Amino acid sequence: MQPLKSNIVPHSATFQEARQAMLELCHTLNEHLESSRFQGKEKHLKRAKEQGKLLARERLELCLDRDSPFLELLPLAGLGGKGFGPGGTTVGGIGLVSGRLCMVISNVGTNKGGAVDYATLQKSLRLGEIAMENQLPVINLVESAGANLPEQARIFN
């Protein structure tokens, strides 16, 4: 097979501008992904630890098989919305449990008590759809205050 020839001119101004724009977008994406890993304020994390509780991502890790890959899904759900931030108060994805692929979902109880806002609800519904479409068993590790009361009309409707 003959190698493909590229028409890209890496030293051109157009290429350099496009490269810089892409690097800025990648930086913004990484910032959003980092903020989606927020598990609550330091005082809430400390209180949970003092009570002997595990954080959401720790519960996930213990549930999954040792060295299991974990494909986190929808970490940016709710980005730009009025809710609890990107990812809501739920972490979910696909990993191995007892050698079988499973959808594993864990509430982030140290962020707003794990209360469910609209973005978290939509994320949870989509995670359930993905599990059904792929015939995956679902494991829910729940620690939640229930519905976010200011949004209850949108959540229970």
Image: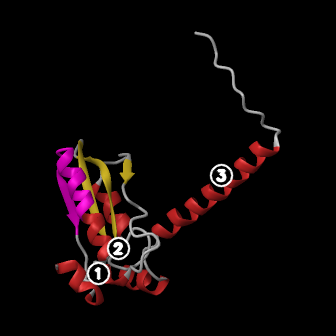
Q: Nearer the viewer, residue 16 or 140?
A: 16
Q: Residues within 10 Å of mark 2 (few under 14, many from 20)?
A: many
Residue 18 drawn at (x, y percent): 70, 48
Distance, label 1 to label 3, CA atoms, is 35 Å
Q: Which quadrant is the C terminus positioned in?
A: bottom left
> Which type of secondary structure does the marked residue at label 3 adopt?
helix
Image-based side of 95 in relation to 140, left or right: right
Q: Which residue corresponds to mark 3? A: 22
Q: Residues within 10 Å of mark 3 (few under 14, many from 20)?
A: few
Q: Is residue 136 visible?
A: no
Residue range in magenta is: 125-141
Question: Residue 146, position in %: x, y?
Answer: 22, 82
The extreme bottom residue here reads: 150
Quadrant position of residue 44: bottom left
In the rendered structure, find residue 40 and report the number of the disc placed on it. none
Q: Which residue lies under the disc numbered 1? A: 115
The amino acid type, in three-letter code, at marker 3 is: Met
Horizontal arrangement in the rendering, residue 31 relative to residue 99 (left or right):
right
Number of numbered discs present? 3
Q: Nearer the viewer, residue 136 or 154?
A: 154
SS label for mark 2: loop
- Residue at x 72%, y 28% (from the top left corner): 7
Q: Where does the image place residue 52, in percent across and percent down from the top left? A: 32, 78
Give the side of residue 29 with respect to residue 57, left or right: right
Q: Which numbered disc flags the more N-terminal residue, 1 or 3? A: 3
Single out the mark in the foreground, 3 or 2: 3
Would residue 29 be visible to someone looking at this image?
Answer: yes
Is 25 positioned to the left or the right of 157 in the image? right
- Which of the marked residues, 2 or 1, is nearer the chain's N terminus? 2
Q: CA distance from mark 3 to mark 2?
A: 29 Å
Return the residue at label 2. Answer: 89
Q: CA distance from mark 2 to mark 1?
A: 7 Å
